[in-house]
Amino acid sequence: MSEYTHVPVLAEETVSLLITAKRGTYVDATLGMGGHTARLLNALPAEASVLGIDWDPEMAGVAARALAPFGDRVKIVQGNFANIDEITAREGIRSVAGALFDLGISSLHFDKASRGFSIMNDGPLDMRINPDNPLTAYTIINQWPYEQIEHLIRICGERHSRRITRAILDARREHALETTAELGALIARVAPARGEKTHPATKTFLALRVAVNYEFDNLTRGIQKMMPLLKPGARMGIITFHSLEDRIVKETFRLMASMGGWKPVTRKPVKPAEAEIIENKRARSAKLRVIEKL
């Protein structure tokens, strides 16, 4: 696993904005390879600990090895943060000193072709964060009707959604679309990029990943279930990587503040400095928003 590395995005900003208490349990709801958790534990005294959660059993194993030097200051659980209430109850945690959601997909998922996330690394049309999830990108592309596919990729910002969906249905009448390269090439043929820096299939791949992993629904549920767990003075930080996620977080935080009992810590999202983007190009679209419980 050493060939896969992941640089935590906005790590310094996250640590400085999230920590308000020097003891208690912090939650890293999207543990990944453990980068943010390591930064948090290094910044906190021995009295503080982190509960790390990841939906992907492979990632939970990677993080366990990476975070082993911290001993019992870190507890790793394989699970979905949408069930944070059940997870904390099982672990005997009644309150939380702070919580982080990093909604980016790990570099391992993009770099490991067999996971089927990347346009650039040819692999099966999979895209599942948790391999036990029955829904795959293959199922959507080869079995969903026109209306569902078109709606899915249109709401994720693809202006050629009708053209792309028609091409997918035409192609699958001949034979099933099996791989990321096959789908990417098909989209590039029917909706070529004109002066754009990203691959023509980028938004379609994003839409598939979001649908396969129920990302928007899980995000909303995760925030709602985290709210009662946070202690007064504790903060919740969320790092997003595309405008749809950011809009959900922005509107949810605004609603929380208007209801009372919460105050925004970041009036505008925190973005990576130019130096971080140069070092880690995957950070370029990251935005961090933080809210505090009163």
Image (tube, grey):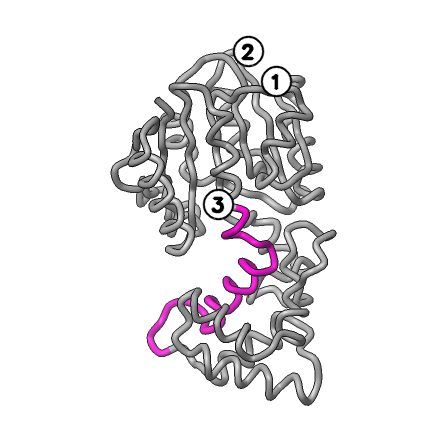
- Is residue 240 found inside the magenta-colored segment of the image? no
Q: Nearer the viewer, residue 154 or 239?
A: 154
Q: Are marks 2 and 1 in contact (CB under 8 Å)?
A: yes
User: Which mark is drawn over residue 220?
Assistant: 3
- Is residue 200 found inside the magenta-colored segment of the image? yes
Density class for disc 1 (Cα within 10 Å; few <14, some 14-19, many ≥20) is some
Question: At 54% across and 34% down in the image, what residue appears?
Answer: 35
Q: Are marks 2 and 3 in contact (CB under 8 Å)?
A: no
Density class for disc 2 (Cα within 10 Å; few <14, some 14-19, many ≥20) is few
Measure the C-alpha gap from mark 2 to mark 3.
32 Å
Residue 217's x, y, as percent? Answer: 52, 51
Residue 1's x, y, as percent? Answer: 69, 43
Q: In this figure, which residue is indicated by the disc labeled 2?
A: 46
| Amino acid tagged 1 | Arg
| Amino acid tagged 2 | Ala
Say what secondary structure mark 1 lies in: helix
Measure the C-alpha gap from mark 2 to mark 1.
7 Å
User: Which mark is drawn over residue 282?
Assistant: none
Please provide the residue range marked out in magenta.
Answer: 194-218
Indicate which disc, 2 or 3, sits on the residue closer to the N terminus.
Answer: 2
Residue 280's x, y, as percent? Answer: 44, 47
Indicate which disc, 3 or 1, sits on the residue closer to the N terminus.
Answer: 1
Q: Are marks 3 and 1 in contact (CB under 8 Å)?
A: no
Tag nearer the camera, 2 or 3: 3
Tag nearer the camera, 3 or 1: 3
| Amino acid tagged 3 | Thr
